[in-house]
Amino acid sequence: MVVMKDILAAARAIHGVADATPLVPSLVPSTVFGRNGGALWLKLETCQPMGAFKLRGALNAISHLPEGVPGVTCCSTGNHGRAVAYAAAARGLRSVICMSELVPKAKVDGIRALGAEVHIYGRSQDDAQIEAARLSAEEGLIDISPFDDPHVIAGQGTIALEMLAACPELDALLIPLSGGGLAAGMAVAARALSPDMRLIGVSMDRGAAMAASMRAGRPVEVEEVPSLADSLGGGIGLENRHSFRLCRDLLDEVVLVTETEIYVAMQALYHEDRMVAEGASVVGLAALMAGKVTPSPQMGTVLTGRNVDMAQFTQVITGQGVTLGDLTVKGLPYG
């Protein structure tokens, strides 16, 4: 299992490349709740070189590979693939990124621009994992899990180290929750440094695999559907060895937000804080705005990535309707 010493080692491995992103206060709580809103600190992983927090875990995992490996592969909903491509290119390794048809074109194009090969396979992250497993078995590529890899989890945990170093008064973390690599790593670090801190995983209410698995008491499959928080899609793997147990044991609760709540939070982040971010980045803010999380004096969340489809983002911030498969989020002018 991942422990604090692994996260401290990861901090050394990524130093100078994927660390030290800003931690800034949001204007949204004071706008929405007034003086009783508490403070909400935003960890700007949108400032990473490839636009998302995933670079931390990918760099740490690739730093542990032996010399002479033929290359790496992974399945991804977009940002992990981009991170693996970036980290592999820095080491001169071949990378093959496997994604489903649901991954937005903007993310696919961004991965190709980093020199990676892209394989589009199936309609879910689980389908894409089948292709990554084939490449690992047949071509000897090292498969780097987006979430269920101890080195990836430790790398993501460095975010909590930095947040608590910058703001030791933090009393709650609202952590975007997908396969659980981010939540698991941050929870390990937070529990070690601030045992009484409230740790809340937040995901969308359609296709939230980790939330469904925690309810069932074991990893389960869910249907992956289009979402504004597309980075949170995908399963956790029925053979999950690490992230499920850590999330189950360390998170205090899991909160689910609707697509409309995500839409409104994206608008608020843009109009109040002037920031461009993916839907997955704002789920913590969405939970707070929707009244699904009780405000506390010093809360923190992670803006996980900026690799958003700008056409869709423009629809959201200008109050236009957005179609997500069989669901349409009605246009909602901000304010």
Image: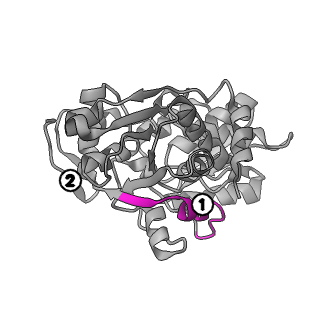
Label 1 residue SS = helix
Q: Residues within 10 Å of mark 1 (few under 14, many from 20)?
A: many
User: Viewer-proximal residue, 125 or 33?
Assistant: 33
Residue 195 numbered tag: none
Of 252 and 276, nearer the camera is: 252
Q: Earlier in the sequence, mark 2 or mark 1?
A: 1
Residue at left offset 57%, top offset 32%? 165
Horizontally, residue 18 falls left or right of residue 325, namely right
Q: Position of residue 100 (x, y in %)?
A: 49, 54
- Amino acid under label 1? Leu
Residue 138 located left or right of residue 123:
right
The percent coordinates of residue 235 (x first, y second) are 50, 62
- The segment highlighted magenta reads 238-255
Q: Nearer the viewer, residue 112 or 199?
A: 199
Q: Position of residue 30 (x, y in %)?
A: 25, 33
Asked if the stretch drawn in magenta spans residue 69, the answer is: no
Q: Can you tell which quarter of the image residue 310 is in?
A: top left
Residue 285 appears in which quarter of the rendering? top left
Query: Residue at the spot x=49%, y=40% of the render?
Result: 108
Q: Nearer the viewer, mark 2 or mark 1?
A: 1
Task: Please report the residue visible at 33 percent of the width from the left and 47 percent of the height from the top.
Answer: 228
- Provide the residue designation for mark 2: 328
Name the quarter where the N terminus is drawn: bottom right
**Figure check: 246 above or below 320:** below
x and y percentages locating residue 144 in the rendered image: 67, 50
Quarter where residue 276 is shown: top left
- What residue is shown with label 1? 246
Mark 2 neighbour density, 10 Å: few (under 14) some (14–19) many (20 or more): few
Q: Quadrant of the C terminus?
A: top left
Q: Is residue 243 magenta?
A: yes
Looking at the rendered structure, the number of numbered marks drawn on it comes to: 2
Secondary element at image label 2: strand
